[in-house]
Amino acid sequence: MSTFWTEFLNAAANHPFPLTPGGFLSPLDMSPDDVLFPNVPPAPGMPCAGEDRSIYRRGARRWRKLYRVNGHIFQAKRFNRRAFCAFCQDRIWGLGRQGFKCIQCKLLVHKKCHKLVQKPCSNEHVDPVEVKDDANGESTLGRASSVRSRAEPEPPLPETPPAPAPPAPVRPEDLEPGSQRQYSLEDFELIRVIGRGSYAKVLMVELKRTKRVYAMKVIKKALVTDDEDIDWVQTEKHVFETASNHPFLVGLHSCFQTPSRLFFVIEFVRGGDLMFHMQRQRRLPEEHARFYAAEISLALHFLHERGVIYRDLKLDNVLLDHEGHIKLTDYGMCKEGVRPGDTTSTFCGTPNYIAPEILRGEEYGFSVDWWALGVLTYEMLAGRSPFDIAQAADNPDQNTEDYLFQVILEKTIRIPRSLSVKAASVLKGFLNKNPVERLGCGENGFLDIISHPFFKSIEWEMLEQKQVVPPFKPRLEGERDLANFPPEFTDEPVHLTPDNDTVIADIDQSEFEGFEYVNPLLMSLEDCV
Ligand code: C58
């Protein structure tokens, strides 16, 4: 059995006319093209004044794994209602992704039975790229969602399915005296939209009681309740808990939910992101790029040591605090529970930063983060992506995701001659297409990074204690200065659309039980106000 993705990529690479980029784009990713320039171009399709087309804000996506057996194209699925396995006739029930469904003929089987299916697919000739969403709103190829393979055996099938427990929101008055109170949407004033991804919208908010500002990541449950996406909400929470102990990772204030949404309240980092900073600077002096790359390395290494692959390093996710130190945000793509040498295989990330081993459909580990750091460091030093293709904008065939993937896999990376030998060497080290030879991925792991000549002037211990003065201090007028924020969200209304009863009726609220959380450390800080 091969994963469908491997085959699909091979087919795409040999395809004379590129498959539509829409085949890859997530239908959830429907915000207008996330380009950053508010100006009007001289003519449609022309770049705006000062526009650098190499830098786009594009959301990360997860691709769903598809398994091909006997003409069927199976996708992991969670079944809330009655479903019976077409192979063993038993009921498909249990938590998590307990079954597989063919995206063509809709055949349902247990995950454990899917390889044994003998009945061929009745609908074999449907081009998977052309498959449209069916009436149930189920996704087709290209929808941005994750697959996390479950190692545990299937739970035994109960005689009668347990009734889903009703959601149990905890009210402050229900709590023991002295325990932390929970938060709700009413506690916050929504100030403005500051970011958006395939799954989430991010707001700047104020906690009314303390007037403190936070970032609030809002996720619609309807987008995660389908299929196997639930565990990444858990992962995001765990990573937040881990991250609270590190100076270069954003920490979590609290979590709460409404019938339609999940909310992560995040410590607010005020200096904007590296994407915004780069758009003003074009390219950074080596000294500056070195500082950021070194702080990011420490953050990644911290996560790796705790079994987490970050998987979504990009300029938009590197925030600058008021002093100019970095903080990584967005743990929505993380993979947790990875031990040294362990691998995973979910196809995910943001196209420009996806490592070759992911594109090749190979198993991968922490190596993908060091690749992404290579791409990001290249962007800082060169002012453009290493995979930028001149004239690509004019040639529609070269403007597709497939073409980008082909370039990442095959093209030799050109390092601008203006860069120093050490900078060129660190870029070549991180951007090695072979993860085994890549800088940071060998036997010595992180040691090879900290001892690389490019980082010679870095005092790593001082750096981790924020004892090194950042090369650039974001200009901030006051607590709520918006000068460093991307302008594209300025006009967006901050309100959340009212809950829709029919959408809510389809959500299995039991999936989100226990989501509420209050960070005790941040809470006690608040009480000091
Ligand atoms: C920043 N790229 S999680 C805006 N986007 C985000 N900002 C923050 N967290 C996240 N303090 C995002 C996104 C996430 C997932 C979906 C995609 C967007 C954040 C966290 C903590 C500030 C921001 C740019 C920016 C940075 C600072 C202020 C305003 C805008």
Image (cartoon, rainbow, N blue to C red):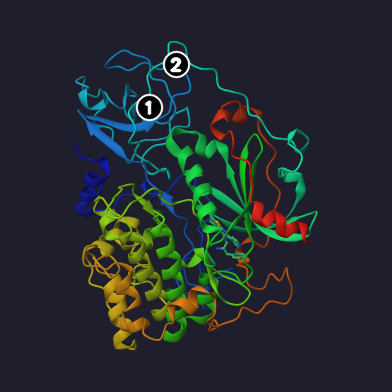
Residue in the picture at 34% in, 49% down: 347
Quadrant in the rendering for residue 382: bottom left
- Residue bearing mark 1: 98
Badge 2, how many Cα within 10 Å: few under 14, some, many 20+? few
Q: What residue type is labelled 1?
A: Gln
Closer to the N terminus: mark 1 or mark 2?
Answer: 2
Q: What residue type is labelled 2?
A: Arg
Query: Would you say 466 lies left or right of 112 here?
Result: right
Residue in the picture at 34% in, 86% down: 419
Q: Which x, y percent locates residue 447?
A: 32, 72
Q: Which x, y percent locates residue 461?
A: 46, 76
Quadrant in which the C terminus appears: bottom right
Quadrant in which the N terminus appears: top left
Residue in the picture at 44% in, 51% down: 333
Q: Which labelled disc corresponds to residue 82?
A: 2
In whole angstroms, how far apart are the C-alphas of marks 1 and 2? 13 Å
Q: Can residue 492 be seen in this view?
A: no
Quadrant in the rendering for residue 91: top left
Q: Which x, y percent locates residue 400?
A: 34, 58
Mark 2: which secondary structure? loop
Q: Which of 221 and 322 is in front in this view?
A: 322
Q: Does the beta carbon of the residue at mark 2 sit less than 8 Å from ligand 1? A: no
